[in-house]
Amino acid sequence: MNKEKADSIKDLMEVVSSSEVGLVILDKHYSIRIWNLFMVNHSGFSAESVMGKNLFEQFPDISKQFFIDNAQQSISQKQKRLTTWQQRPYLFKFKNVRQRAKSVAFMYQNITFIPLASASGEIDNFAITINDVTDIAASTQQLDAVVSEYTSQNKPKDN
C-alpha cells in the first residue's frame, strides 16, 4: 500500500472514530468488528473490550428479534434500513447527556442498518449507525402534550 492510500485510510478512520454518530460494524454472526468513539463514550466499553464479541452477549438488553429482523431485511434486500425512535425509542439504552432534554432519562436513537458488500458482492458484514435524536424526541413529546392538553380543554361541550 502506498503512503497516500495509507494516509487516506488513516484520515477516514479518524473521522469514523471521532464522529458524533455511533458506528458499529458486525459480521454475519453478530460479532463486533468496529466500535467507534461515540460507542465507547456512551456505552462505557472500550473498543478493545468488545471487539470480536457477540453483540447480544455483550448487550443482553438489546431486543434480539427486532435487531435480527431489521439486519436480515437490510442484508437480503441489499439496502439501508432505517428505524426511528418512534418505532422503538432506542437500541442501546444509553443515558441521556443532552442538556436541552434534561427530563429525559435515556438517549432516543434513530438506527440505520447498512449492508456491506465485499469485492465479490457477498454481504459478509453490516454496519449500524446510531444517531442521538433525544432533543427531537423530547421536543416532539412536549409539543404533543401541549396539543393534547389544548385539545382536551377546548372540546365542544355536549348539550
Image (cartoon, helix red, strand yellow):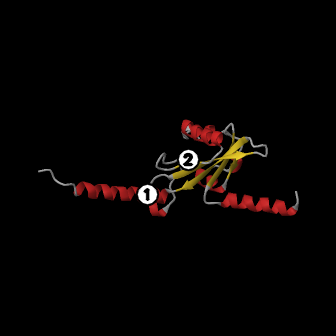
**Three-letter amino acid code at the position of disc 2:** Phe
- The residue that label 1 is drawn on is 138
Q: Which residue lies furthest to the left in this view?
A: 159
Residue 107 is left or right of residue 72, and the answer is left
Residue 62 is left or right of residue 75, and the answer is left
Q: Where is residue 111 in the image (x, y as percent from the top left)?
A: 56, 49
- The residue that label 2 is drawn on is 92
- Whichever of callouts 1 and 2 sits on the residue coming sooner in the sequence is 2
Residue 77, quarter of the rendered image: top right
Q: Position of residue 8 (x, y in %)?
A: 79, 62
Residue 156 is left or right of residue 64, and the answer is left
Labels 1 and 2 touching (C-beta < 8 A): no
Residue located at (65% from left, 41% from top): 75
- Between 84 and 38, the one lying in front of the other is 84
Residue 55 visible in this rendered orientation of the protein: no
Q: Position of residue 127 (x, y in %)?
A: 66, 48
Secondary structure type for disc 2 = loop
- Between 107 and 95, the one lying in front of the other is 107
Residue located at (69% from left, 58% from top): 16
Residue 93 visible in this rendered orientation of the protein: yes
- Between 76 and 59, the one lying in front of the other is 76
- Residue 94 - label: none
**Three-letter amino acid code at the position of disc 1:** Ala
